[in-house]
Image: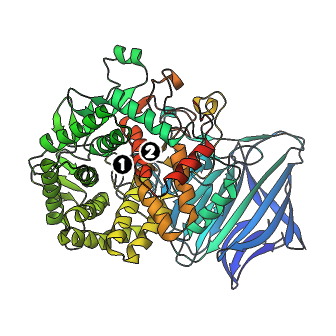
């Protein structure tokens, strides 16, 4: 039985103490009710004077030289998770203006090796041991700030998809939640472990220390303070959750928060999915497809005048074979062309696929990662030259399989597509090791696996199963099953990493998409519920990256003016702190997961993701300073590369392609009418 023990000030305890105990053992504690950090670094702890119980609530009173404090405490539970709610009301009783911040920090006892989760931005240690190539916040007991590695961090809760911090120990999962705003602004997370003490809690208002992850502010710490006048009152609240140390228990709390927020946080698509696909196909073809080279350029700037002045350097004349361009979106455009009877789209899609298949072969016999106008066919954005990344290659083959099967059903046989599929899948099977690992990076000259670590090879599972459906060769299914068992350890550890080329060995939202796609495909091919459970876990981990509510934006920023809705948007990764729509890649699998589990949560959150993606696709020339059919990749929900409330003013091919892919997938789904009606219901600008 877990209880909150309230110890008023006495001869032994100068400030009094709050202790959470289990069978008389203290799990976590703090001195006094709260402390105030003055701007001049002086700290003032508000003492516990007395408490009284009334019905199911306890009133705790406290004081200090400058403050009176009342805390209402109650205990509750849901889904076998106990929580303790503390509602604070603090009054400045001094005659002075007080400048500083409140800190409610708890010390975890017997916790020398904590495991962290802050949804969307911090997973375990953020792979501090592997990810030092990239500078973003990571955790280690031994700080190395030049690599953004520290043993303590504080962040604005706005950075995360949910204002909660989780910490696992050997015996319990602890988590502390606060609403995303309090009476005076935004709170902040705080966590620390120096090898002898572990602390978690919140600051009111937030700070971002010891480094802020804000490029345009040179990573300088961001220290927010209150300016409290005489008799001014500050109010905030906390919920402390404690449960068994199951790594998946976070999901119960995320679901609780989602449903708590849902009624007052609705999506706001600008138009229906049908209209979104129409605009996206127009933009992908007009602004990104290059008929001369039969490629899809990855980016194009909003500003044609600027483009002339910088010699079109805002146009990235590159094409990855998948991921940010390539076969994935060529297939979507081609399939959409058949639906709307647009021969230009069909021809463009096929020409891009033929370009990759006929010309994109590396010396190793597998496809190169990308084509560039400067260098032709070459490797991608890798940690060292002459490497081909497994995820980029396997996603390309997965969608080549989809394109081949689709065309075959239309009566068209593409022998060159078939040959490319079989050649690359033979490579994958040949390099798969005894454990089932496909490796993450291959030599472009020999095909040798150069880096085994990470989960970039996870998508080979889906590619192999897709090929198994076409060619009925057992070796494809057997290899996929073998890999399914290997990569399961990452899913069960709730830590999947290494998918995107630009986030080397970092956990990302894209890793979770790949896992959902792969394990749903395994379940469909085998009927083994082991794979369905892993798909479910992967989907739940995906939701840690997905916003369950709408943020407010600074007045007169573009996201504020256009009433941008964050619900359903995914944080790309702890490295890339912007919202994106890549989650649309697993819409078909999420709908299958909903059908298989009858869990309405998956349906609602998938619809949120679709609705999120139906914003900021330019409806006309000049819409948000873009041309019709353009769509940005990055929405800055916090200060990062650019200020909060802004967008990256480049249209990205993959963003448009994903909207098209979502449409063509849903168009042939049994849930088509449901999804179309739900997105239409939320439309703000249905007739525009």
What crowding class fits label 2: few (fewer than 14 Cα within 10 Å), some (14-19), or many (20 or more)?
Answer: some
Judged left or right of residue 510, residue 181 is right
Q: Residue 93, image x and y in percent?
A: 90, 48
Quarter of the image with the C terminus is top right
Q: Is residue 448 visible?
A: no
Between residue 446 and residue 603, name the one nearer to us. Answer: 603
Between residue 545 and residue 147, name the one nearer to us. Answer: 545
Q: Is residue 73 visible?
A: yes
User: Is 564 situated above or below 286?
Assistant: below
Q: Residue 687, image x and y in percent?
A: 59, 32
Q: Residue 279, image x and y in percent?
A: 45, 33
- What kind of element bears circle 1? loop
What residue sits right under mark 2 in the picture?
576
Quarter of the image with the N terminus is bottom right
User: Is 489 situated above or below 460?
Assistant: below
What crowding class fits label 1: few (fewer than 14 Cα within 10 Å), some (14-19), or many (20 or more)?
Answer: many
Judged left or right of residue 688, residue 589 is left
Judged left or right of residue 526, residue 302 is right
Q: Are marks 2 and 1 in contact (CB under 8 Å)?
A: yes
Q: What is the spatial separation of the Cα atoms under label 2 and label 1, in whole angstroms?
A: 8 Å
- What kind of element bears circle 2? loop
Judged left or right of residue 37, residue 168 is left
What residue sits right under mark 1 in the picture?
503
Q: Residue 455, image x and y in percent?
A: 32, 60
Between residue 283 and residue 217, name the one nearer to us. Answer: 283
């Amino acid at each position: 039985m877990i209880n909150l023990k309230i110890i008023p000030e006495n001869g032994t305890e100068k400030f009094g103490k709050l202790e959470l105990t289990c069978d008389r053992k203290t799990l976590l504690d703090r001195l006094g009710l709260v402390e105030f950090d003055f701007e001049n670094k002086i700290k003032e702890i508000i003492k516990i004077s007395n408490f009284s119980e009334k019905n199911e609530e306890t009133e705790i009173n406290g004081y200090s030289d400058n403050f009176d404090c009342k805390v209402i405490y109650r205990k509750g539970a849901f889904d076998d998770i106990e929580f303790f709610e503390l509602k604070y009301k603090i009054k400045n009783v001094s005659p002075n203006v007080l400048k500083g911040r409140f800190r409610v920090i708890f010390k975890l006892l017997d916790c020398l090796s904590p495991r962290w989760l802050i949804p969307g931005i911090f997973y375990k240690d953020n792979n501090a041991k592997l990810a030092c190539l990239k500078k973003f916040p990571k955790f280690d007991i031994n700080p190395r700030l030049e690599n953004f590695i520290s043993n303590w961090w504080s962040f604005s809760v706005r950075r995360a998809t949910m204002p909660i911090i989780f910490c696992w120990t050997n015996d319990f999962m602890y988590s502390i939640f606060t609403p995303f705003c309090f009476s005076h602004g935004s709170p902040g997370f705080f966590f620390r472990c120096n090898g002898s003490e572990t602390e978690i809690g919140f600051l009111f208002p937030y700070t971002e220390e010891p480094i802020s992850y804000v490029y345009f502010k040179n990573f300088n710490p961001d220290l927010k303070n209150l300016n409290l006048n005489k008799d001014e009152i500050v109010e905030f609240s906390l919920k402390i959750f404690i449960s068994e140390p199951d790594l998946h228990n976070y999901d119960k709390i995320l679901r609780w928060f989602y449903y708590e927020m849902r009624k007052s946080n609705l999506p706001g698509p600008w138009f229906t999915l049908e209209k979104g696909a129409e605009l996206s196909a127009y933009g992908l073809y007009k602004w990104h497809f290059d008929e001369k080279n039969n490629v899809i350029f990855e980016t194009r700037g909003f500003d044609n005048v600027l483009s002339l002045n910088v010699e079109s350097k805002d146009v990235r004349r590159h094409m990855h074979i998948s991921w940010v361009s390539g076969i994935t979106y060529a297939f979507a455009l081609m399939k959409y062309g058949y639906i709307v009877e647009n021969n230009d789209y069909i021809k463009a899609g096929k020409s891009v696929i033929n370009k990759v298949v006929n010309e994109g072969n590396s010396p190793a016999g597998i496809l190169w990662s990308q084509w560039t106008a400067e260098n032709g066919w070459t490797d991608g954005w890798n940690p060292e030259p002459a490497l081909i990344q497994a995820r980029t290659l396997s996603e390309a083959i997965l969608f080549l399989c989809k394109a081949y099967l689709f065309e075959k059903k239309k009566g068209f046989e593409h022998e060159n597509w078939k040959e490319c599929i079989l050649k690359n899948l033979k490579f994958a099977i040949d390099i798969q090791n005894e454990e089932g690992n496909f490796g993450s990076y291959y030599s472009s000259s020999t095909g040798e696996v150069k880096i085994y670590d990470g989960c970039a090879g996870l998508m080979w599972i889906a590619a192999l199963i897709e090929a198994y459906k076409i060619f009925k060769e057992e070796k494809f299914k057997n290899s996929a099953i073998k890999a399914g068992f290997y990569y399961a350890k990452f899913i069960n550890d709730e830590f999947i990493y290494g998918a995107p080329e630009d986030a080397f060995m970092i956990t990302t939202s894209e890793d979770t998409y790949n896992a959902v796609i792969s394990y749903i495909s395994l379940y469909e091919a085998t009927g083994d519920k082991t794979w369905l459970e892993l798909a479910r876990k992967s989907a739940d981990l995906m939701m840690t990256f997905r916003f369950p509510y709408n943020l407010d934006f600074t007045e007169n920023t573009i996201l504020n003016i256009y009433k941008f809705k964050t619900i359903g948007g995914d944080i790309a990764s702890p490295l890339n702190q912007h919202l994106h729509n890549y989650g649309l890649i697993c819409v078909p699998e999420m709908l299958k997961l909903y059908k298989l589990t009858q869990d309405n949560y998956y349906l609602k959150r998938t619809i949120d993701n679709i609705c999120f993606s139906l914003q900021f696709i330019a409806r006309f020339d000049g819409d948000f300073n873009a041309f019709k059919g353009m769509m940005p990749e990055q929405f800055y929900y916090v200060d990062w590369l650019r200020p909060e409330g802004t967008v990256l003013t480049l249209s990205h091919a993959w963003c448009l392609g994903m909207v098209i892919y979502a449409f063509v997938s849903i168009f042939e789904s049994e849930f088509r009418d449901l999804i179309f009606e739900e997105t239409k219901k939320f439309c703000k600008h249905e007739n525009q």
